[in-house]
Image: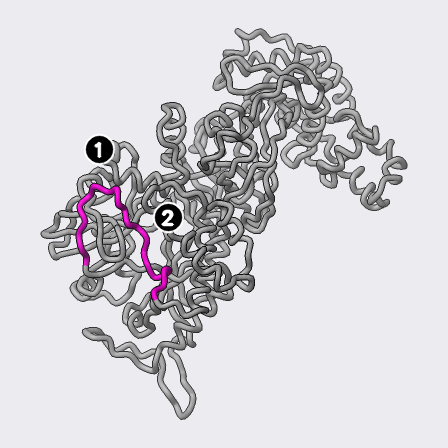
């Protein structure tokens, strides 16, 4: 069924024929059973959506009377939970993937609104009136919308009577629900009593935070228990456990977004706007979407969606959708419904981040810190508008935990839309015959025997001087923005210059002007580009000691450690004649004995000393200088988060100013943050800081007190 699914995923709508109808119906039945009943999907949500839309297209085209796409799947045969009936069925939303569809949705909403509306029991809401033949809207034909998260979890309904939670049910099929009251009582953020006496039926999603999901799977791999393919499946499984104490350990969260007895509640509370309904639930101590906006018209919605990426990175949940709803409740019935969904709401889906593909082969890649990393070569797949052909497997312990093999079908995700990552394997019956991935005996670059790092998961090549792969990685790393910051010098150019013997090591980069004529003979290199390259190399000669130490690529020595040990280097002699013992070095804070040993080994290596000596003939280092700290400053030793770049300063420049006076620069807001340095368009970090009570400061205040 997996191969048949892939066949239909590749087909366009125009290629679909009537004979494909039955096959797609069978596929949707098969995948729905895996998803809803067994919590073991073999395709991603977006791939399921694609198959569903193709079936929907065929059912409409060929006038199918009993449409399979009209059903809600969840015939949980194995369930031991009691089934209950409910009067208001759960409905789905129409969805879109682009801005034009959102504008079309807005036009359909406006088109369905007549000249005047008199909602039952509410004030008359006049949206337009006629003068002659011309309609004039008091909103310039603009509709106010609400924008909020669409959580990818398990839908549940909480029933309250006389202030108390009396029952919790989750969807089983279109009308019937499962009683999961005992387990829901274990979810900490669900209020067990509320300040509302009347009958109330609150709907929302139970979700598992990504951090909890990752910890759960790590422990499952160690214990040999069930490994989940995504947080949604983990949340669903956790809520349906017979042992409610297991549910409590899973740290699930509930977010409210709807009411089953919506009309009754809004009439009782005299509410006419959807946004006011959601805020009223928050006042009853239900947790709601932390991202909830009321916007004046569709273009503001589109702008907010386009600015959502930075917000997305701060959320500990998988958010692939945003929901847009008409804010005025009186318009809902007027705008109406289709057979499947309301016309007053729509879900905007971000480009797919998780898809399935196949591992063709595995390369064993040598990095700048000597580590051998398995990298999977994949059948090319388009994720978030990027063709992905490779994905890291991190280390060989991860390979073993995932039990991933060459030829496996796998779920792949682009973490933060950048780094491809294999998150789980699609379990198929024939995978026992697939080739296992094993650690190579010799370095694939220099053929030196590979060594296992004692008490660690990594395998490494000990040939730190002559291994070609390490050499390339170190040179590419050294010219990167945060180190020598040499523009016009990229990975392909480093490889080309090494191949053409223009450079052999980093010191040769600073002699690049001597190779001007040789470079001009290479394809694509012109006078202007070579001049620019030489100019950037010249400017890169001036570097501070912390960045210089980072360039050395000593294993496990990153920016924080480099800054800590920079105080050891006050002159050229300190670098070339490193005489500190392990006992002396351990007096410095926050560095373990293994890292100290790596530092000692590096500076005592004769080959490294020769490279350092040559390099120091070309670079101009700013060595460590003792600074006088004003200890009565209110900012000493405090942690500061910065929202983004300002008009006159980049975030990196401001962070550097912080570090110069021993402030601690951090990248995200938490309860341990002392200050948030905010720009006027701070977005999510400002909201989080305010919610946690973190002191917010602005640029003038920051500079005045620096």
Please provide percent x and percent y for residue 643.
Answer: 48, 44
Q: Evaluate whether residue 304 shows in this view.
A: yes
Q: Residue furthest front?
A: 19
Please provide the residue range marked out in magenta: 66-86
Determine the CA span between mark 1 and mark 2: 24 Å
Determine the residue positioned at 40% across, 77% down: 111
Q: Residue furthest left?
A: 162
Q: Quadrant of residue 692?
A: top left
Q: Which residue is mark 1?
A: 243
Q: Which residue is mark 2?
A: 152
On screen, residue 632 versus residue 516, left or right, reads left
Tell me which label, 1 or 2, sits earlier in the chain: 2
Q: Quadrant of residue 187?
A: top left
Please provide percent x and percent y for residue 32.
Answer: 37, 49
Q: Residue furthest bottom?
A: 132
In the image, is residue 82 part of the stretch drawn in magenta? yes
Mostly what secondary structure, the magenta segment?
Answer: loop
Please provide percent x and percent y for residue 613.
Answer: 75, 17
Q: Are marks 1 and 2 in contact (CB under 8 Å)?
A: no
Task: Using the image as rendered, state which of residue 134 and residue 97 is in the foreground.
Answer: 97
Determine the residue positioned at 54% across, 49% down: 384
């Amino acid at each position: 069924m997996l191969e048949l699914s892939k066949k239909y995923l590749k087909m366009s709508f125009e290629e679909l024929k009537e004979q494909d109808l039955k096959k797609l119906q069978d596929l949707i039945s098969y995948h729905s059973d895996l998803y809803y009943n067994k919590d073991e999907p073999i395709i991603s949500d977006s791939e399921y959506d694609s198959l569903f839309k193709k079936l929907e297209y065929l059912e409409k085209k060929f006038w199918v009377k009993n449409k399979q796409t009209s059903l809600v799947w969840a015939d949980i045969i194995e369930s031991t939970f009691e089934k209950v009936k409910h009067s208001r069925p759960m409905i789905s939303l129409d969805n879109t993937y682009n801005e034009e569809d959102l504008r079309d949705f807005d036009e359909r909403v406006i088109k369905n609104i007549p000249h005047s509306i008199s909602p039952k029991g509410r004030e008359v809401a006049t949206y337009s009136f006629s003068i002659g033949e011309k309609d004039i809207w008091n909103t310039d034909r603009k509709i106010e919308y609400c924008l909020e998260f669409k959580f990818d979890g398990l839908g549940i309904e909480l029933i309250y009577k006389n202030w108390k939670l009396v029952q919790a049910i989750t969807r089983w099929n279109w009308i019937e629900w499962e009683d999961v009251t005992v387990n829901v009582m274990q979810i900490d953020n669900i209020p067990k009593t509320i300040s509302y006496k009347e009958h109330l039926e609150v709907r929302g999603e139970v979700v598992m935070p990504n951090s909890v999901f990752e910890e759960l799977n790590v422990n499952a791999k160690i214990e040999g228990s069930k490994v989940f393919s995504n947080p949604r499946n983990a949340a669903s499984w956790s809520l349906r456990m017979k042992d409610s104490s297991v549910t409590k350990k899973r740290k699930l969260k509930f977010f409210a977004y709807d009411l089953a007895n919506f009309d009754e509640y809004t009439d009782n509370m005299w509410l006419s706007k959807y946004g006011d309904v959601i805020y009223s639930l928050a006042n009853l101590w239900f947790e709601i979407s932390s991202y909830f906006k009321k916007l004046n018209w569709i273009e503001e919605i589109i702008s907010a969606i386009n600015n959502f990426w930075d917000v997305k990175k701060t959320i500990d949940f998988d958010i692939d959708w945003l929901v847009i709803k008409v804010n005025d409740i009186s318009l809902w019935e007027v705008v109406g419904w289709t057979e499947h969904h309301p016309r007053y709401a729509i879900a905007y889906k971000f480009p797919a981040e998780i898809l399935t593909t196949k591992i063709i082969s595995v390369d064993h890649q040598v990095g700048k810190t000597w580590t051998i990393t398995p990298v999977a070569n994949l059948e090319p797949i388009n994720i978030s508008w990027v063709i992905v052909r490779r994905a890291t497997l991190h280390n060989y312990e991860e390979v073993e935990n995932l039990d991933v093999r060459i030829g496996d079908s796998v779920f792949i995700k682009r973490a933060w839309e950048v780094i491809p990552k294999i998150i789980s394997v699609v379990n198929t019956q024939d995978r026992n015959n697939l080739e296992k991935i094993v650690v190579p005996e010799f370095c694939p670059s220099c053929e030196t025997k590979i060594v296992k790092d004692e008490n660690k998961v990594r395998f490494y090549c000990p040939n730190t001087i002559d291994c070609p792969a390490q050499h390339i990685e170190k040179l590419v790393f050294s010219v990167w923005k945060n180190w020598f910051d040499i523009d016009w010098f990229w990975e392909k150019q480093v490889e080309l210059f090494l191949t053409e013997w223009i450079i052999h090591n980093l010191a040769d980069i600073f002699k690049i002007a001597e190779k001007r004529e040789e470079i001009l003979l290479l394809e694509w290199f012109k006078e202007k580009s070579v001049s620019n390259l030489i100019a950037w190399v010249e400017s890169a000669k001036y570097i501070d000691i912390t960045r210089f130490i980072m360039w050395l690529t000593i294993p496990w020595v990153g920016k924080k450690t480099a800054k800590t040990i920079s105080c050891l280097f006050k002159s050229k002699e300190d670098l070339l004649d490193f005489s500190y013992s392990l006992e002396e070095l351990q007096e410095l804070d926050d560095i373990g004995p293994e890292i100290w040993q790596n530092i000692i080994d590096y500076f005592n290596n004769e080959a490294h000393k020769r490279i350092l000596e040559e390099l120091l003939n070309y670079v101009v280092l700013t060595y460590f200088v003792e600074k006088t700290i004003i200890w009565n400053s209110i900012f000493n030793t405090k942690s500061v988060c910065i929202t983004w770049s300002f008009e006159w300063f980049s975030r990196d420049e401001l962070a550097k100013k912080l570090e110069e006076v021993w402030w601690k620069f951090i990248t995200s807001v938490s309860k341990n943050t002392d200050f948030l340095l905010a720009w006027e368009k701070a977005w999510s970090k400002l909201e989080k800081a305010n919610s946690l009570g973190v002191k917010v400061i602005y640029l003038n205040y920051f500079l005045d007190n620096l």
